[in-house]
Amino acid sequence: MGARGFGKEVIEHRRAVVNSETELIWAMRSATAEPTATQSKKTRSSTLKQIDGSLTSLTLTQETSGDFVAPYPSHILMKNAFRRLRNGRNSARTAAFMAESIVPLARVGRVESPEPARIASGPELTACSDAEKYFVDTLRQIETGRSRRQTIVSVYHNDDGQAVALRKRSDESSALTLVDLTANDAIIPAGTIVGVYAHNAPLTAAVSPTRSQTYSAYNAGKSMAIAPIRLSPWAHTDELDQAAFGVYNFGDSYDYRRGNMIRSVTIDDFRQAAGQVLAMCGVS
C-alpha cells in the first residue's frame, strides 16, 4: 500500500473507532444511570460525572483529531481520569471505573501483575503534541550518541534494576512509562506520559559522555511516584491506533511526517534505550 493509501486507511480507521467508542460510552452511561445491586448511589454518581465530563468533549473529538494528543474518546476519558487521580478526587471509584471501563475500551494495559507506583504531588503538568517528537529525539540520541538537544536524560528504575520510566531533558518534567503500573489501584499502562519530580527518587548514578549530554539513573524504589497525564501512541500495539495520533484538520488529513516518526519506534525500542542508560550508569 502506498503512503497516500495508508493515510486514508488511518483516517477511516480513526473515524470508525471514534464512532464505535462513542456508542459504547453512551451505552455505558445509560447502564450506569440505572440503579443496580452491585453499585452504590455514590459509585453511580461518581461514574456518571466522569462519563458526562468526557461526553462534553466527544463532539469535538468526532469532528477534529483531538489536537494530536487524544484522537479517541477513550483517550479523553483516560485524561480526565488521570486528572482526578492527580487531584485526589474519589481515587478508589476513579480507579474502579478505569479498570472496568476505560482500559478495556482503549485496549491498553496488558500485564496481569503491574508494577506498584504511587500518585505524586507537585506542580500541574501537561504534555503537548511535541512530546512524542522529544521522546523519539531522546531515543535517537541514546542510540547514536549524537546530540538531539536532550541535555539531561534520566531513567527511573526499581529496586531490581528494571527500567520503569524514561525521562526526556530535565527542564521538562515528563517521562514515558515502560511497564504497566498500578497507583492507588488504578492501571497506568506502559506508554503513558507521566509527570515525575526528581525529589521523589534518589540519584543512583550519572555519567556525562560529552559536555552536552548527561545520563542519570534514579532509584524509584518499590513504588515510583508519578503524576499520570495522558496516553502516548506507544500505549497501543496496533499500528493504525498509533498512527491515529497523526490525524488532523477536522479528522480529514494525516500528517505523514508525524505519523512516520511515531511508527518508526516501538515501546520495546524505548525499553532497550533505557537499558543502555542504566548500563552506562552501572545499574544491573
Image (spheres, grey):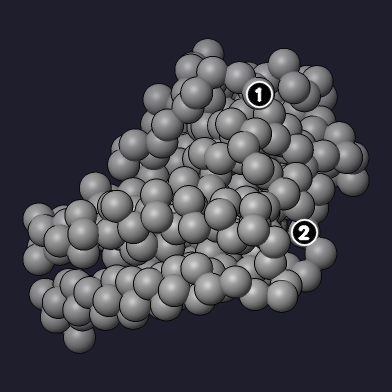
Instruction: Give the residue at mark 2.
Output: 114
Point out residue 255 in the picture as x, y percentages from the top left corner. 17, 57
Point out residue 67 in the picture as x, y percentages from the top left corner. 24, 48
Could you tell me how far apart the alpha carbons at marks 2 and 1 are, in whole angstroms? 21 Å
236 vs 6, nearest the viewer: 236
Please tell me which residue is depicted at 75% across the width and 28% down the height of the picture.
Answer: 218
The quadrant holding residue 259 is bottom left
Q: Earlier in the sequence, mark 2 or mark 1?
A: 2
**Residue 168 visible in this rendered orientation of the protein:** yes
Verify CB contact (< 8 Å) between mark 2 and mark 1: no
Report helix, strand or loop for mark 1. Answer: loop
As shown in the figure, which amino acid type bears the numbered disc 1?
A: Ser
Q: Residues within 10 Å of mark 2 (few under 14, many from 20)?
A: some
Point out residue 87 in the picture as x, y percentages from the top left corner. 59, 31
Point out residue 191 in the picture as x, y percentages from the top left corner. 55, 54
Report helix, strand or loop for mark 2. Answer: loop
Please tell me which residue is depicted at 49% across the width and 58% down the height of the picture.
Answer: 48
Q: Is residue 269 left or right of residue 279?
A: left
65 versus 204 height, above or below: below
5 vs 216, nearest the viewer: 5
As shown in the figure, which amino acid type bears the numbered disc 2?
A: Pro
Mark in the foreground, 2 or 1:
1
269 versus 28 height, above or below: above
Quarter of the picture holding the N terminus: bottom left
Q: How many marks?
A: 2
Q: Residue 121 has which mark?
A: 1
